[in-house]
Image: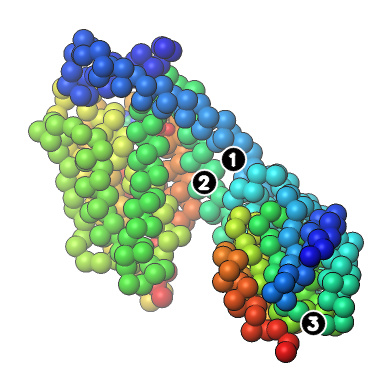
Amino acid sequence: MQKNELRAFTTWLGDNDVCYTVVKQNAVVELPDAIENSDSVAKLSEGKIYPMLVNLKEIKSISKEARDHFSMQNRPPGVSAIGLLIKSPASTLIGNFFLGLNKSIVPVKLFTNEEKAVLWLKQFQKK
Amino acid sequence: MSKELEEIYKKVCLLAGEKTSIKADKKKGILTGLKKLEETLKANKKQEEENSKRINEILKVVISLANLKYDKKAKISNKKSHFDALALGINMLGEELEASTISLHEKEVLLKEIHHRVKNNLQVISSLLNLQSEKIKQPDLLETFMESQNRIRAMALVHEKLYQSKNLSQIDFTEYVHSFINQMSSSYSLDPDKIKMHMLADMNPHFFKIDTAIPCSLILNELISNSYKYAFPKNRKGNIYLHFAKEKETKNTAQYILEISDDGVGISPEIDIKNTSSLGLQLVDLLTSQIEGKLELDRKGGTKFTIRFPVEKN
Ligand SMILES: Nc1ncnc2c1ncn2[C@@H]1O[C@H](COP(=O)(O)OP(=O)(O)OP(=O)(O)O)[C@@H](O)[C@H]1O
Ligand SMILES: [Mg+2]
């Protein structure tokens, strides 16, 4: 499996047909990073739509424009659902923003446990 | 071993009812424990100074948001602490408010609310922190340690009562006062024949919201600790009285009275309670205005603090 190292993220497509994004240590996520991420996910998916696990644990901050991009309000979603992996107070807070003020058009749920997140995401796999 | 540590060591021996000439292995145990305590306190002091700086910074951003100015941002460190999350949260909220299409009036209402909540909470934390770092400059580390424990315990008790109560947003302050007194008398393990504690509290339940309960619990803690600490020096005997009751009520609000008094030596006449350099009474003054209360001091025959405050009925 091919891992893509972006400025703020690492992305790959798992053998389990779940798309992965891991935020790098202390990343300050801006709009170009968000675009780089969705481009990378689009390439990995090759026209198919997968559910995505985003590990936010190490994030430092995320700009308004990047949040809006990830909420996918004005673009085709590219993923079927998003599981957000949280731990630090900041990652929890950002997770909550994606449930409230920056609501995404696909289902979003917060998890602290990766296995549980993947289990939840699997129901959104397109047959 | 530092001077402070030596002092503490002597006190611990006294407290344990031992002569300074206790067995060598026991002594070693106590000393290692104390050294650890000293190191922790030193580290804590630095942390507390850092924390109050962060709080002030965040507060400034909140204030500018409340004035509908969105350009100020709180700094975020790489530590991923609760302060970093608070700073990030305030920043993100500011961005959303700036971008949102809600009316100016709605924004104002929303921001006043945020300002009020954040400020109240931060003020309490920050006073506590100031108090702490101020005290740690003084030599008596053991006392400092015990006192900070009491302050934290007073607040923790409120939370505990809150979780125990069926109604999660309100706490029965009558019950709180009783638990508090139990906790207090055991933390100042003094001779009950020397100082007697008297409760004149109404036994009926009185439910307070957390915004009122926390300030009240801290006021209680400061004033009762002062009576224990200063009212009865040397072998003086005496009494401490606590009076808590609902005084009157109208359709929408009730007025409560919280009175802490002692028949001790009295606060020295030079001390102006509205203008002290010591932090305990400053905190009492600050917290009283936070609950929109009135503070009075009667110096006849000892010390009597009376706080009257309104509580909105729901
Ligand atoms: N009940 C009392 N009886 C006699 N003196 C008192 C009493 N309460 C306060 N004082 C005097 O007033 C001073 C100021 O009290 P305050 O609580 O502000 O400061 P503190 O107790 O010295 O320090 P801190 O409360 O910040 O730990 C005390 O140092 C003490 O001399
Ligand atoms: Mg005091």
Residue lying at the far bottom in this picture: please name it. A127
Foreground label between 2 and 1:
1
Residue at mark 1: B51
Three-letter amino acid code at disc 1? Asn
Q: Quadrant of the C terminus of chain B?
A: bottom left
Between B83 and B185, the one lying in front of the other is B83
Rendering coords of residue A90 (x, y %): 65, 56
Between B168 and B30, the one lying in front of the other is B30
| Other residues around mark 3 within 10 Å, as few (<14) / some (14–19) / many (≥20) | many
Residue at mark 2: B125
| Other residues around mark 1 within 10 Å, as few (<14) / some (14–19) / many (≥20) | some
Q: Quadrant of the N terminus of chain B?
A: top left
Rendering coords of residue B156 (x, y %): 38, 51
Q: Residue at x 46, y 60 (%)?
A: B211
Mark 3 element type: loop
Q: Is residue B71 left or right of residue B248?
A: right
Q: Is residue B49 above or below residue B197?
A: above
Between marks 2 and 3, how big is the CA–CA gap? 48 Å
